[in-house]
Amino acid sequence: MITGTPKPIEEILEMLEPYDKIIVAGCYGCVTVCRVGGEKEVQVLASTLRLAREAAGRKITIKEISLERQCDPEYIEQMRGYVQDYQAVLSIACGAGIQFLAEKYTTTPLLPGINTGFLGVTERQGEWAERCQGCGDCVLHLTGGICPVTRCAKSLFHGPCGGSVQGHCEVGKDVPCGWQLIIDRLKALDQMDNYTKLKPYKGWNTSRDGGPRRIVREDMI
Amino acid sequence: MLKAFENGADGVMVVGCLEGDCHYLSGNIRAKARVQRVSAILGRIGLGAERIHMYNLSAGEGSKFAAFANEFVEKIREMGQSPINAARLKVPEQSAGGER
Ligand code: SF4
Ligand code: SF4
């Protein structure tokens, strides 16, 4: 899922300074799962904003909504009937969802209520960790199911660098060396020959280096 | 919990069973984490983090409950009115709440 963290309330209040009537828009997708932008978070944020603004002597009116997904046009359309009645929309979906809302409602300012993080997993309740950087050319079949792009701090493709010490990455004691994880796993799978199948270079043209990406599925259009 | 403050509470006392004695195993531990979150929010928006507090006691500790309640009410009295209620006194015609 796409993860994120709430923006500091002070930053949100500053963004909302020009406005007295807004929509706080959540998303039932990824951000609900990582507890940063679902219905419950909409309620908490809206309550917090109302309290903060009232204590400051300037009330704010808030419509609380959550869309099934802010990254799909049919759900965004559900807001069409009332968006124009509000001065701004504070969205707590991921950056993709917020941008899609902004694209569809061009005369209403869209504000981000969260800082979008990474593509990750729930390691345990309340703790999420990055697993994929969407490089567009997956090699997990060769690396024991462990992503070198993400788990290696330098996204190396040829094994551990000199900074790998006793399984730890040089960027921090609590960061496992991604390549040590890969080698250990390949050995356990008896697949060390996979190491030689990896290309010595990785083409990044399928990743962000080729600019914003697009997928077109002719069979679905 | 935040709604209680929107509805005009000057303080909110949350009472849970003793840690380790929760019928739902960790319900009271999780409640404690939620209370801490709300307390931090109240602190950051200037209402005062101490306006919410969680107490733990068993169902048989009636006198302890009364003592906790008195202690909390006393603390909130000392803190005075929440800034929300103070602001409302200045502008009595406005009421709280949002739209759905
Ligand atoms: S808008 Fe973002 S958070 Fe919501 S479902 Fe789509 S990708 Fe996930
Ligand atoms: S190799 Fe690329 S697609 Fe596969 S997990 Fe890593 S970043 Fe994601």
Image (spheres, rainbow, N blue to C red):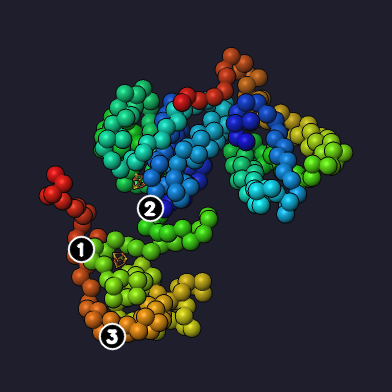
Residue designated by label 3 = A193
- Between tags 1 and 3, which lies in front? 3
Q: Amino acid at mark 1?
A: Thr
- Work out whether residue B35 or residue B23 is closer to the camera in this orientation and state it: B23
Q: Are marks 3 and 2 in contact (CB under 8 Å)?
A: no
* Earlier-in-chain disc, 1 versus 3: 3
Mark 2 crowd level (few <14, some 14–19, many ≥20, 10 Å Cα): some
Q: What separation in Å lies between label 3 and label 2 (alpha carbons)?
A: 33 Å
| B77 sits to left or right of B25 | right
Image coords of residue A123 (percent x, y): 48, 61
Q: How many marks?
A: 3
Q: Amino acid at mark 3?
A: Asp
Q: Are marks 1 and 2 in contact (CB under 8 Å)?
A: no
Image coords of residue B4 (percent x, y): 63, 30
Residue designated by label 2 = A2
Image coords of residue A12 (percent x, y): 47, 40
From this view, report whether residue A147 is shown above or below residue B38.
below
Q: Is mark 3 within 8 Å of ligand 2?
A: no
Name the image quarter holding the N terminus of chain B: top right
* Earlier-in-chain disc, 1 versus 2: 2
Chain label for disc 1: A
